[in-house]
Amino acid sequence: KKMTLQSYYEGLPDAEFPKTNFINTVVSKTGVSAVTVRNWIFYGMKPANENHIGVLVEITGIPADKLWEK
């Protein structure tokens, strides 16, 4: 196959950004904004919706009572 700039680009592996991917996964599973997820992570704010806590437990494997433990 003839190599073009487009085929070269399309052949490159997808970049992996684990932290961004994590935030985007939480956003897609909860329907909240990325800013809200960052507040949960960095400022210790807890979701008002218990289902969102369940999503965090499901994704991380961390028990709910340990998610914001100091």
Image (tube, rainbow, N blue to C red):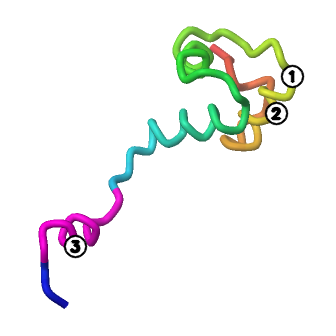
Q: Is residue 57 magenta?
A: no
Q: CA distance from mark 2 to mark 3?
A: 42 Å
Q: Residue placed at 66% from the left, 41% from the top?
A: 60
Residue at image mark 2: 54
Measured from the top left, where is residue 56 in percent x and y?
71, 33
Disc 1 to disc 3: CB gap under 8 Å: no
Quadrant for the C terminus in the image = top right
Mark 1–mark 2 Cα distance, whole angstroms, equals 6 Å
Residue named by callout 3: 7
Tell me the element at label 3: helix
Mark 2: few/some/many CA within 10 Å (<14, 14-19, 20+): some
The verdict on residue 8 being magenta is yes
Give percent across and percent down for residue 66. 73, 25
- Residue in the image at 44% along x and 44% along y: 18
Q: Magenta span covers which residues?
A: 4-14
Identify the residue at image location x=75%, y=16%.
47
Residue at which label 1 appears: 50
Q: In the image, residue 45 lies at what x, y percent?
A: 66, 9
Q: Is residue 30 left or right of residue 27?
A: right
Residue drawn where x is 56% and y is 9% of the image: 43
Amino acid at dot 2: Gly
Most frequent secondary structure within the magenta stretch: helix
- Disc 1 and disc 3: Cα gap in Å? 46 Å
Q: Which quarter of the figure is the N terminus placed in?
A: bottom left
